[in-house]
Amino acid sequence: MFTPMPDTTQKPADAEATDRSALVLILEYVEAECRRLGADAAARHAALAAAMMPGSCAPAGTRLN
């Protein structure tokens, strides 16, 4: 029976942090591309989504609706 090496497995908290960081990077990329294309409202939504990821909070003065 195969047992993974201790150094090749991630702890659940590390994996979650990695996933969260990857999602924030994707949302930042989407925001930048939306701004490049002139879709300012879509860019704001992507920025808000990135700011509201678990582990962070929405910027002060942000309207959610």
Image (spheres, helix red, strand yellow):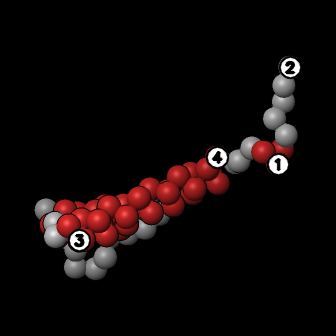
- What residue sits right under mark 1 in the picture? 7
Seen in the image, is 12 located left or right of residue 28? right
- Location of mark 4 (residue): 12
- Tell me if label 1 and label 4 are in contact, CB under 8 Å: no
Which mark is first along the chain, 2 or 4?
2
Image coordinates of residue 54 in percent, x first then y, are: 43, 59
The quarter of the rendered structure image containing the C terminus is: bottom left
The answer to which of marks 1 and 4 sits earlier in the sequence is 1
- What residue sits 81% from the left and 35% below the top? 4
Whole-percent x and y of residue 32?
Answer: 31, 69
Q: Secondary structure at mark 3?
A: helix
Disc 1 marks a residue whose amino acid type is: Asp
Provide the residue designation for mark 2: 1
Q: Is residue 15 visible?
A: yes
**Left of 3 or right of it: where is 28?**
left
Point out which mark residue 35 bears. Answer: 3
Crowding near the residue tagged with mark 4, few <14, some 14–19, many ≥20 C-alpha atoms within 10 Å: few
* Comes first in the chain, label 3 or label 1: 1
